[in-house]
Image: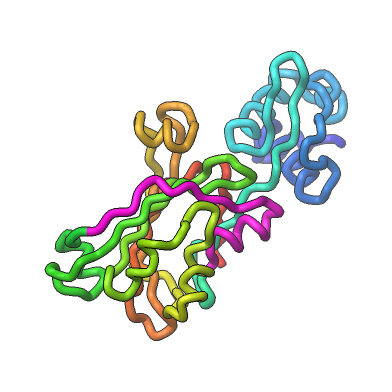
Amino acid sequence: MRLEGDSLVPLYQQVIDDIRLGIDDGRYQVGQKIPSESELSEIYSVSRITIRRAIEELSTSGYLTKKQGKGTYVNPPKIRKKVLQTSPVQSFTSMCEAAGRVPGARLIERERGLPRSCEAKLLGIDESTEVMAIRRVRTADGIPVNYETVILPLAEFSYLLEEDLNDASLTETMSRHGAHLPGRVMDTNMELIRADSELAELLEVSLGEPLFDEKGVFADAEGNPLYLGHGRIVASMFSYSLW
């Protein structure tokens, strides 16, 4: 394949785009070793420096993994998450399954107490109303990808104190108990942060790893708040779409 030398798009970015297209259309399969830098240099008729930059970018963004002395391999597909959540709300389990990944969860802690004033306001409850916080590490194919905190009014969701929430879907658990299910996500906020020592240990990533810090109010179909969600998500494992 010949790249467009007179294009406004840099050559290394054209290489990135074509390799990503190859991953998406099945030219490169998950777990497959891609051609070497010298082979890619011949395929695209560009320097190895250009190829090296493209491979580094694709590795940093989670599409490829470089194995010392072995080559560069295609990673499993990223988990795709919608920015604008419409009914029904995408659960972590459904997102994983859509990507062909096996969802999992490891319970870190479960505690009860009083909400902060901002939490009470978002939930539409009094500050004297007891809530429960559930903290879990969510996994895809056993790999930690999200440190999740969910805050719920205790009276409505007290059964979650006794449920086994390891490798369990919170949405499916709620459904079994006949609870209202989230129909939309309101008041969402997302920013890019870097993993501190605690998050790096929980998510098994390097200190300073880029994470999406995502917060939202999960409401039922009528817009009544159900619970608050806060995720610290490994950025390289996810891709976001508007719809």
At 60% from the left and 59% from the top, the residue drawn is 95
- Mark yes or no: residue 99 visible: yes
Relative vertical location of residue 1 with respect to residue 40 in this rendering, above or below: below
- Mark yes or no: residue 190 visible: no
How many marks are shown on the rendered structure? 0
At 37% from the left and 60% from the top, the residue drawn is 229
Relative vertical location of residue 68 with respect to residue 117 in this rendering, above or below: above
Residue farthest toward the left in the current orientation of the protein: 128
The type of colouring in the image is: rainbow
Between 140 and 80, the residue placed more toward the observer is 140
Residue 127 quadrant: bottom left
Relative vertical location of residue 182 with respect to residue 109 in this rendering, above or below: below
Residue 26 x %, y %: 83, 48
At 69% from the left and 24% from the top, the residue drawn is 66
Q: Which residues lie in the magenta part?
A: 90-112
Q: Is residue 107 magenta?
A: yes
Residue 50 x %, y %: 70, 24
Q: Quadrant of the C terminus?
A: bottom right
